[in-house]
Image (cartoon, rainbow, N blue to C red):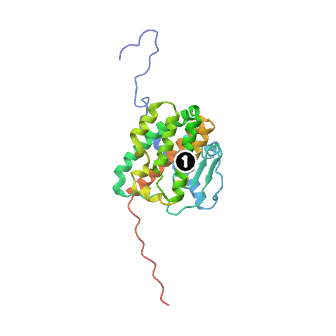
């Protein structure tokens, strides 16, 4: 071992005990903690200890009750939202939703490869559009705001009529990119086009959106983003966009897991006793 340079402290050579821990254990532990929070709240909802319309505790209260970090709490809430158990209204709180039929949308195993790519796009969108929403809140003009409003109104009208909503969905997100004043945001959005919208590439999502409930929930998330941009609140706009896109990612991840799992065995009907 070389002698230490005079005037500088001598540090011990890295050993097995002092080397940095680069294992993914902390990530796994955080996910395990988030799942524990999810199981607690989903159990309370299932057992009717929390009923539709009830407000969940604040993030700080959940952190204290479960002794977890804010990151863990937010991941757990995203999972609950993606499962359709709760809905977060930014600045107000998180509320229990009425039960819905069918649960998460079904993903055909043949679509697993496409779904991996869609998840990758959603990761990009979370990074890109979260900041885009914040900048739009600071820089948007009334013209931008009117264009966003028109896109949302057209979206809602097509939900009611059973028409196509993909173009209006994309137009809303593109108008936010335009409102940043930075042309590169819009360039990236235009390059990706409507393939940004997961239901254009996954038939399981297209089947799920035939009912109004899924699309109405998506547009409620859009309205949260719009409201924050309208009142020029960049932090709320970023949070609302992140919630919206994280929910999409989590719904798709749950569908992936369901597609990879073997189907539940069909149980034979119970014998009917003879009269």
Quarter of the figure with residue 121: top left
Q: Secondary structure at mark 1?
A: helix
- Say which residue appears at 55% left-offset and 37% top-offset: 144
Q: Residue 158, image x and y in percent? A: 51, 55
Say above or below: 24 vs 2. Answer: below
Q: Viewer-proximal residue, 11 or 260?
A: 260
User: Considering the image in quadrants, where does the N terminus appear?
Assistant: top left
Q: Viewer-proximal residue, 151 or 225?
A: 151
Q: Which residue is mark 1?
A: 152
Q: Is residue 114 left or right of residue 45?
A: left
Please identify the residue farthest to the bottom as the structure is shown. Answer: 275
Q: Residue 242, image x and y in percent? A: 52, 41
Q: Residues within 10 Å of mark 1 (few under 14, many from 20)?
A: many
Q: Viewer-proximal residue, 69 or 130?
A: 130
| Residue 218 appears in view | no
Q: Residue 275, image x and y in percent? A: 50, 90
| Residue 63 appears in view | yes
- Say which residue appears at 38% left-offset and 61% top-offset: 262
Q: Is residue 142 left or right of residue 117?
A: right
- Say which residue appears at 47% left-offset and 60% top-offset: 210
Q: Is residue 127 left or right of residue 48?
A: left
Q: How many marks?
A: 1
Q: Residue 31, image x and y in percent? A: 49, 45
């Amino acid at each position: 071992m070389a002698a230490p340079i005079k005037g500088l402290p001598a540090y011990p050579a890295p050993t097995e005990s002092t080397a940095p821990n680069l294992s993914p254990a902390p990530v796994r532990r955080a996910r395990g903690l988030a799942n524990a929070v999810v199981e607690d709240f989903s159990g309370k909802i299932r057992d009717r200890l929390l009923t539709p319309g009830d407000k969940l505790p604040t993030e700080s209260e959940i952190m204290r009750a479960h002794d977890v970090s804010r990151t863990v709490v937010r991941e757990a809430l995203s999972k609950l939202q993606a499962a359709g158990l709760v809905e977060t209204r930014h600045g107000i709180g998180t509320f229990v939703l009425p039960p819905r039929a069918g649960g998460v949308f079904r993903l055909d195993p043949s679509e697993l490869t496409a779904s991996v790519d869609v998840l990758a796009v959603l990761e990009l969108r979370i990074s890109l559009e979260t900041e885009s929403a914040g900048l739009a809140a600071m820089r948007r003009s009334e013209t931008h705001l009117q264009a966003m409003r028109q896109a949302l109104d057209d979206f809602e009208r097509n939900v009611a009529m059973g028409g196509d909503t993909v173009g209006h969905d994309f137009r809303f997100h593109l108008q936010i990119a335009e409102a940043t004043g930075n042309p590169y945001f819009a360039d990236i959005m235009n390059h990706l086009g409507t393939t940004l919208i997961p239901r254009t590439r996954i038939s399981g999502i297209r089947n799920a959106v035939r009912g109004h409930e899924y699309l109405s929930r998506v547009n409620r998330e859009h309205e949260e983003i719009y409201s924050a941009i309208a009142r020029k609140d960049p932090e709320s706009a970023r949070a609302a966009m992140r919630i919206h896109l994280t929910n999409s990612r989590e719904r798709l991840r749950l569908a992936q897991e369901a597609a990879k799992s073997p189907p539940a065995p069909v149980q034979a009907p119970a014998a009917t006793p003879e009269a």
